[in-house]
């Protein structure tokens, strides 16, 4: 968590996913009295706007991922901002890209990182993995991600 490139990569993921630490699926940045925000971080907040999708928090972590990485994997029992950050890093570790990100090789890490984060492109000049088919998930361009990453202090190899 202390590595500047990892912090910048997390900020770029959060920007792409449109999340906030208190967002359920469907929350909108800047919207007042948004019903899809939560204030109880004691546990994963569950489904959002559609009543099914459980993506929540800064990195839009679904309930199954929270249980797998948090409860079972690291013994975490809440869904605080710190827990969300730890789970995001745990995902990057499990994907085998954390060292590439630390080294500033974000392009090498992007393909794997686009698997759990639907708003990420699969690589430079590529769309997201979930942009077509039944999901039709919007995603940012690699250039947008890279710009956000650099603005957050990340360096590129």
Image (cartoon, rainbow, N blue to C red):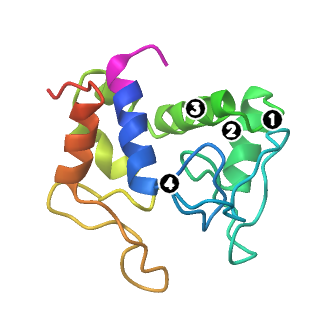
Q: Looking at the rendering, which quadrant does residue 133 occupy? A: bottom left
Q: Which residue is mark 3?
A: 85
Between marks 1 and 3, how big is the CA–CA gap? 12 Å
Q: Would you say the residues marked 4 and 3 are in contact, meaning their CB atoms lie under 8 Å apart?
A: no
Answer with the quarter of the image where residue 31 lies.
bottom right
Mark 4 and mark 3 lie on one chain; the one further toward the N terminus is 3
Q: Which residue is mark 1?
A: 78
Disc 2 versus disc 4: distance between alpha carbons?
Answer: 13 Å
- The disc, 4 or 1, on the residue closer to the chain's N-terminal end is 1
Quick check: marks 2 and 1 in contact, CB under 8 Å?
no
Q: Residue at x 40, y 48 (%)?
A: 15
Q: Secondary structure at mark 4?
A: loop
Q: Is residue 103 left or right of residue 76?
A: left
Mark 4 Cα-neighbour bin, 10 Å: few <14, some 14–19, many ≥20: some
* Horizontal and vertical percent position of residue 28: 54, 63
Work out whether mark 1 precedes mark 3 in sequence or the reverse, and give the earlier one: 1
How would you rate the neighbour count of disc 2 (Cα within 10 Å): few for under 14, some for 14-19, many for 20 or more?
A: many
Lower sequence index among marks 3 and 2: 2
- Residue 33 appears in which quarter of the rendering? bottom right
Q: Is residue 35 magenta?
A: no
Q: Residue at x 69, y 56 (%)?
A: 37
Q: Secondary structure at mark 3?
A: helix
Of badges 4 and 1, nearer the viewer stands: 1
Residue named by callout 4: 116
Would residue 60 be found to the left or right of residue 16 on screen? right
Figure check: 19 above or below 12? below
Q: Give the number of the disc on residue 127.
A: none
Q: Which residues are magenta?
A: 1-6
Rendered residue at 29%/58% (across/down): 122
Q: Is residue 133 above or below residue 144?
A: below
Badge 2 marks a residue whose secondary structure is helix
């Amino acid at each position: 968590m202390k590595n500047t490139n990892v912090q910048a990569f997390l900020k770029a993921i959060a920007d792409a996913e449109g999340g906030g630490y208190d967002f359920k699926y469907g929350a909108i940045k800047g919207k007042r009295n948004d019903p899809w925000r939560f204030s109880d971080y004691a546990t994963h907040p569950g489904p959002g706007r559609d009543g099914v999708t459980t993506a929540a928090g800064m990195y839009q972590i679904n309930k199954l991922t929270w249980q797998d990485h948090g409860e079972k994997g690291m013994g975490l029992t809440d869904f605080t901002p710190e827990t969300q950050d730890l789970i995001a890093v745990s995902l990057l570790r499990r994907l085998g890209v954390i060292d590439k990100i630390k080294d500033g090789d974000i392009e090498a890490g992007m393909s794997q990182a686009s698997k759990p984060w639907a708003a990420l492109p699969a690589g430079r000049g590529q769309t997201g993995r979930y942009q077509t088919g039944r999901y039709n998930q919007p995603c940012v361009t690699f250039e947008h991600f890279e710009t956000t990453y650099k603005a957050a202090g990340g360096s590129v190899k």
